[in-house]
Amino acid sequence: MSIAAVIDISLLVFLGLTAFAILKLRALFAVVMLSSVFSLVSAALLVHLDAVDVAFTEAAVGAGISTVLMLATLALTSRREKAPTRSQALPLIVVFLTGLALVYGTLDMPRFGDPQAPIQVHVAPKYIADTQSEIGIPNIVTAVLASYRGFDTLGEVTVIFTAGIGVLLLLAGFIREPEGLRVQTMDHHLVLRVVTKMLIGPIMLFALYVQFHGDFGPGGGFQAGLIFASAFIIYALVFGLENARKAVPGRAVRLLVACGVLLYGGVGFVSFLFGKNYLNYSVLGVDQVAGQHLGILLVEFGVGLTVAAVMVSTFYAFAGQNQPISDEDW
Amino acid sequence: MGVDDILGLFNYWMVIVLMMIGLYTVVSRGNLVKKIVGLNIFQTSVFLLYISMGKVTGGTAPILTGKPEVYSNPLPHVLILTAIVVGVATTALGLALVVRIKNAYDTIEEDEIQAADDEKEFGDAAAAEDGRR
Amino acid sequence: MIAAHLPILQVVVPLIAAPLSVFCRRGSTAWALTFGVSIAALAISMALLGQVLDRGTLSYELGDWAAPWGIEYRVDAANALVLLIISGISTVVLPYARVSIAHEIEPHNQTLFYTCYLLCLTGLLGMVITGDAFNAFVFLEISSLSTYVLVAMGAKRDRRALTAAYTYLVMGTIGATFFVIGVGLLYMMTGTLNMADLAERIPAIGANRTLVVAFAFIVTGLGLKLALFPMHLWLPNAYAFAPSAVTVFLAATATKAAVYLLLRFLFTIFGTTFPTFEPTLTYLLLPLAVIAMFAASTVAIFQVDIKRMLAYSSIAQLGYMVLGMSFATVTGLTSTILHLFNHALMKGALFMALGAVVMRFGDATIDTMRGLGRVMPWTMAAFVAGGLSLIGMPLTVGFISKWYLVAAALESGLWPIAVLVVASSLLAVIYIWRVVEAAYFDDPPEGVTAGEAPPALLIPTWTLIGANIYFGIDASLTTRVAGEAARVLLGTAS
């Protein structure tokens, strides 16, 4: 067995143990923390499987924003799960049979890592062979994401936009005490205050790097948006929601959410003027590669804008639910 | 089935086990937050299934280096980036609903919500019967 | 020049309108934008159907990347008709929604409500028009996520809307994830995501256990989404507690889009020669459809909440659609597709009538219905007309659907099934009669005075009733398109 296989197997076993602990534990705070661990270990496995962009995103989403939202939810609801009262037999049988069916399905699969598997010989080779000449950027994932399958990504931005609007509809108009928000600040902790101030600048700078370096290395609008939002969320956590809202008011965030989708969708229309199909970026520049380059830059910026704004607005909506999270609670 | 087959499919089998632990958490647990965590595990494991199929032995991340190299398949990566976004969108909406449910029912346990609804339902039905008489 | 871009405009116009509506300061402006977009979408789908009937299948390559490397939109008679149903119902629902939503949703939420509605419309249109399996998933999720929110907006009237939305979210996500697993396995064995390319490559592989499992997961996932019995548990409460206009829109369109995707995967992508195709249809879908027809109709009879009664009726009606496809014949598929269209008309009208009752009295229980024949004569007359169509009376669209379904069963030599179809209609007679009896043979409770719903609700309701009767008398257009769609799906188009 090669070292690669050993790494692969140990990470998978570790994931299995984490998932099992999540199933069994009833202290929800521990469950949320373990779910964050599950994401981080998955991210490590994804790197091992060469999916660096995916790993980056999984770490930012699973260990970052999902955990923040889940902790906020626990603070507003309850920290402990009650013991199950119903029989677990039927779910167990259904799940077991589903798993068995999937295992049956693996028997005719190409073996793991097989370079002759159908997916390695049809469709994908063109992306690897032609990205350099047709799009002109080194990161093939970005090329496929933003151009070859750019419409899926417009759909993806729309999905995150939908979530942002949905959370606003469900929570924003629903603040329990009319006098407004009373989320406790943590700015009396000197260490937190100083460290936060030191961190926010570099985090935002890193977000910009990830945003504009996505053509060359792992990264892109989605990851950058998440990182940018996290800088903002840290600020709000330490200095209070009211101060954060003074910096960027809720309505402005809401409009920024919309602007990202409009930018992405709008870029697609430009090609109509030149008699080309929707989302053909080649018309944007003097030649195809220049056009694709500019197109990808613009749509990635749209993605980043919407993602960052949705994350901030979702955080506002959850944090605005006015159940002060104090130090003693944890 | 030889050792090569077992090693060649082990990855998929482990991923299936993870998927099923996630799915079981969703369908068997009554706590609404726990269900969402279960959905996350289920979906993350599906991501691993997709990425596993794109891996090429001896391959490297699909970022062109200018040197002749074997690259893993970029397409599953693209699909899963989209799927991760769908996943976090679902999580955010699910949790927002949980917060609203807690506020309306003062519990996030499925059994207690069901009991409260039944009481209201049969209370309503009984009232309707009274009205008829 | 624009004519060539119609396929993408069908989806992108509502998609772009959604973020634009966020800029509207007032709910009424957002409504006007949504209504305008809906009319445009209807015009586009009519033009597309015309083009398809004239010239056959249309293909549109996004970003000018050739399929299967890029994403392709592919329009033929089957999805052109479903697009028309979705945009048509949306255009009728919106005038109704303006008044009913103003009544049911808090003023500060109305702008974003229409944003969400536009997203739902975008998602449904996108998942139907696309020729790419993964793109279908993305738009399926846009429609699903916005639907969960729209359902939850009923919480102002009844808190159960929240739990209904949560249950729907969990079940819907499991369904969508099953679908993604299936698509992933298909991709693994073929290397492609393009539907037309898949359809070519799958038969070439031959007997393969991975493909069989992919088939099972796609059928199960879509079955959950279309509320195929016994995976229907999310549906009754979602329809019962959503705001009235949302119930009308969802009941008439959402499950239809899922039925369409199932048809597309079963017939176009896997095809009738796929090893598990016939056993699945004969031994799984057919029995489940028959059980749905009877079980769901029986449960409907015992419902106190009439909105929920109609929701159970929808599960039974989905049974008719699945039954038609299980014959795998041109007549069978014609009946399924006809019923997609016809059921949208009848359930749309029925839920609209109930929405008017809810607006006046706050709920629609059987007790509320007492004496309504005199209190709200026009509303109840519409309910009766819609009910007759649901039962399958001649001169209504319901009759046309049943006629083709019975003919398809007889053509396949399954006369007991034909008898069961007719027998199950009797159950519909019973549950509709319960309402009619309460409305026309009971006295209204004391203190309830006559008061009709406003014209803004009545006109859309009667528009749909008119369509029920018009297409019930002259079914030549609908049967021609449905027949063409059936032949396209079976690959026997001229």
Image (cartoon, coloured by chain):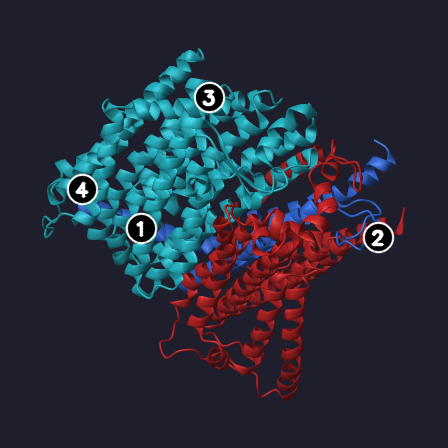
Chain colours: A red, B blue, C cyan
Crowd class of label 3 (few under 14; some 14 to 19; many from 20; radius 10 Å): many
Of A75 and C12, the residue lying toward us: C12
Q: Please determine if labels 3 and 1 lie on a single subunit.
A: yes
Please tell me whether mark 3 or mark 4 is closer to you in this view.
3
Of C205 and C47, the residue lying toward us: C47
Crowd class of label 1 (few under 14; some 14 to 19; many from 20; radius 10 Å): many
Q: Amino acid at mark 4?
A: Thr
Q: Please determine if labels 4 and 1 lie on a single subunit.
A: yes
Cα separation between marks 2 and 4: 74 Å
Please tell me whether mark 2 or mark 3 is closer to you in this view.
2
What's the chain of the residue with tag 2? Answer: B
Image coordinates for residue C29, horizontal then vertical, percent: 30, 60
Q: Is residue C305 visible?
A: no
Cα separation between marks 4 and 1: 24 Å
Cα separation between marks 3 and 4: 39 Å
Quick one: SS at disc 4? helix
Q: Is residue A57 visible?
A: yes
Between discs 3 and 4, the one toward the N terminus: 4
Of A151 and B8, the residue lying toward us: A151
Q: Which residue is painted at 76% across and 47% down in the image?
A: B72
Between discs 4 and 1, the one toward the N terminus: 1
Q: Amino acid at mark 2?
A: Lys
Crowd class of label 2 (few under 14; some 14 to 19; many from 20; radius 10 Å): few
Q: Which residue is mark 3?
A: C487
Q: Which residue is mark 4?
A: C379
Image coordinates for residue A106, horizontal then vertical, percent: 72, 35
Q: Which residue is mark 1?
A: C35
